[in-house]
Image: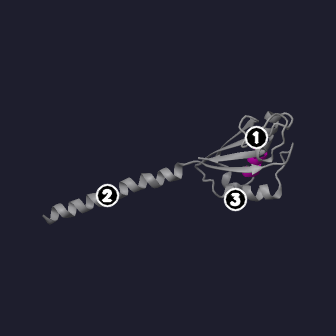
């Protein structure tokens, strides 16, 4: 009888670990998204943007996949080109940090296609002028 109880206890303990580990691992697999905001018609990172980028960089593991997407508002000229320039500015900033050199980055431009705030044409909206960083 003790053997059955001990075996049952062992199996229960193992099942707790078996089910809790994937839950913890799944929580770590959820992508995290951050936004770095830019000035109108600019891809230059401000001091506060660089500070935020440093904070984000500390969250990026060497095995991570990171997507950097530049976005614009509807009043900015050449939004597709500006979005890519913004994404590349953040990518260049990240690659200057030695721990991030081996991380897989993908830089792209969303232009005006994915605004945080929907606006009409030729409307300045600071929340749409951003670089969105997704860490997976």
Q: Are marks 1 and 3 in contact (CB under 8 Å)?
A: no
Left or right, 5 with respect to 125, comes to left
**Is residue 45 within the magenta segment?**
no
Q: Secondary structure at mark 1?
A: strand
In front: mark 1 or mark 3? Answer: 1
Looking at the picture, tell me which residue is in the foreground, 13 or 73: 73
Residue under the point 79% across and 58% down = 48
Looking at the picture, tell me which residue is in the foreground, 100 or 7: 7
**Is residue 88 within the magenta segment?**
yes
Left or right, 91 with respect to 16, comes to right
Instruction: Residue at the far bottom: name it.
Output: 2
In front: mark 2 or mark 1? Answer: 1
Image: magenta residue range: 87-94
Magenta stretch secondary structure, dominant: helix
Left or right, 119 with respect to 29, comes to right
Residue 53: where, in percent of width, then height?
73, 55
Q: Quadrant of the N terminus?
A: bottom left
Q: Which residue is mark 2?
A: 14
In this picture the colour scheme is one colour
Rate crowding at label 3 as few (under 14), some (14 to 19) or many (20 or more) other CA atoms within 10 Å: few
Residue 131: where, in percent of width, then height?
74, 45
Give residue 116's mark: none
Residue 117: where, in percent of width, then height?
73, 42
Q: Are marks 2 and 1 in contact (CB under 8 Å)?
A: no
Rate crowding at label 1 as few (under 14), some (14 to 19) or many (20 or more) other CA atoms within 10 Å: many
Q: Secondary structure at mark 2?
A: helix
Q: Which residue is mark 3?
A: 55
Give residue 71's mark: 1
Residue under the point 72% across and 58% down = 54
Q: CA distance from mark 1 to mark 3?
A: 21 Å
Q: CA distance from mark 3 to mark 2?
A: 37 Å
């Amino acid at each position: 009888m003790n053997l059955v109880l001990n075996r049952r206890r062992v199996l229960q303990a193992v099942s707790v670990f078996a089910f809790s580990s994937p839950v913890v691992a799944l929580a770590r697999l959820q992508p995290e998204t951050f936004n770095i905001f830019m000035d109108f018609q600019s891809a230059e990172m401000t001091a506060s943007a660089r500070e935020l980028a440093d904070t984000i960089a500390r969250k990026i593991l060497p095995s991570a996949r990171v997507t950097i997407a530049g976005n614009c508002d509807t009043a900015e000229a050449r939004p597709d080109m500006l979005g890519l320039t913004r994404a590349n500015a953040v990518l260049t900033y990240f690659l200057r940090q030695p721990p991030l050199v081996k991380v897989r980055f993908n830089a792209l431009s969303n232009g005006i296609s994915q605004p945080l705030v929907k606006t009409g044409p030729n409307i300045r909206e600071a929340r749409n002028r951003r670089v969105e960083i997704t860490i997976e």
